[in-house]
Image: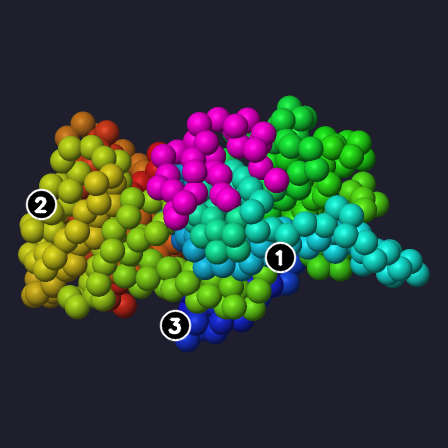
Amino acid sequence: MPKALLLENIHPDAAQSLRDHGFEVECLKGALSEDELIDALEGVDLLGIRSKTSVTRKVIDARPTLTAVGCFCIGTNQVDLEYAGKNGIAVFNAPYSNTRSVVELVIGDIICLMRRIPAHTHHMKHGMWDKSASGSHEVRGKTLGIIGYGNIGSQLSVVAEALGMRVLFYDIEEKLAMGNAHRCDTLNELLEQSDVVTLHVDGRKSNTGFFGEDQFEHMKQDAIFINLSRGFVADLDALKKHLDSGHLSGAAVDVFPIEPKKTGDEFLTDLADEDNMILTPHIGGSTLEAQKSIGQFVSQRLEDYWFKGSTMLSVNLPQITLSDIKSNFRIAHLHANLPGVLARVNRVLGEDGINIAASEVSEDMYASIDLVLDKLEAQVKKFVSRNKEIHRKGRANDIDVYTFEVTEEDGERTITGRDHFSPKPMSPDEAAMQLDANDFEFLTFLNSENDRINVIYRRKNGNLGLIDPIF
């Protein structure tokens, strides 16, 4: 039975959906460190995380059987996407599911800070009656500056306009303005005009420290600052300085450079003593509605990848949408975009009498081929004359490892196999590493790019796979 590990208190709908599709599911409430994650991933095929667990190169190298990672959130900067892709690990996220929840929190923060609700609440809790309009404003007619005009920024733009706000936005990419929003040519142009500045940038490394002393200096007198994007984007020491000086009238911060890994952990910040300040524990997308939607969305992406080979909405693999499997088998081949690779695969399949019922190929390096197998009794005999032997090499992490000995014109060469091909996409090593010498029906060897050797095999349980060797 395939296994999924879900971390960081992911909505139970995700676990239930995976169980309904035949997965053994383990759920943990907190995030895991790098070493803890490596230990926990033993025997795991699918991993689900949120923002605090990092899937690094070390994790990927230690657990090559991992097939896919679901980020049950918007951001994916916690995963080494490029390295995961090179190792055949698909990564999915939920780019839209919590957009409305974040937008509503930003609107709530704006209204509360404009009316100085945090300061009034603090005074009331400490026995002070301070009925005053000083520093309190309506949001109607005020200017909102949105930095980062993606899914959240653009929807925020629409809602803010409905409240009567004038909307400016700045983005390094070309974006279509919603409603009457105005695009600023420079960041400073936005900062110098906005009564409220809100950050909605992504998690790319180049955004680290993006909003610092110089940017705060350019903000209007008595402006409000809001960050619900990434904790490493804004300089919180600079923010405190401009709050203490009276330059800024208030702020809301939902994300921090360093955050606790689980609920209940201690958290301290120098911003806690500010008067008109809203501090929230990274809950921008944490509504029951959003988490339920994310749980359903990401689990479906993982299931589609596992059972169909569909990579649609993957953030690190070529995207291809596939229907249900209607033929005997489906093989999904992840390969370099080099000439002749698919032609070689098709030739080997044809030589063994395997009919291709349908195939789809992405623009980059992903192919799906549906197969119809006839006359299996004749086909399974061909491996005897075509190629030679399979030998157990040893065990690595309690998984059998094999070498394939291939006789060629230039002599013998020994290679170690790893699976990139399966009827329903398996983890890279699953089929190859678990092959038993008496458990296969035929093997076919094929030269691939850079004179690599691929091995197509059929196991007695009916699974068909392609081993892409590493040597």
Q: Is residue 49 left or right of residue 171?
A: right
Element class at badge 1: helix
Check disc 1 and report the residue beneath it.
108
Q: Are marks 3 and 1 in contact (CB under 8 Å)?
A: no
Which span of residues is magenta-colored? 166-195
> Residue 271 at what x, y percent from top left?
78, 42
Q: Are the residues tagged 1 and 2 within 8 Å (C-beta)?
A: no
**Position of residue 9 measured from the top left corner of the image (x, y, whole percent):** 60, 63
Return the disc, 1 or 2, that comes first in the chain's sequence.
1
Q: Is residue 174 magenta?
A: yes
Give the residue drawn at x 68%, y 55%: 112
The amino acid beneath tag 1 is Gly
289 to 394, vertically: above or below = below
Q: How is the image coloured?
A: rainbow
Contact? badges 3 and 2 (CB < 8 Å): no
The answer to which of marks 3 and 1 sits earlier in the sequence is 3
Comparing 460 with 39, the one in front is: 39
The residue tagged 3 is 21
The quadrant of the rendering that contains the C terminus is: top left
| Disc number lying in front (1 or 2) | 1
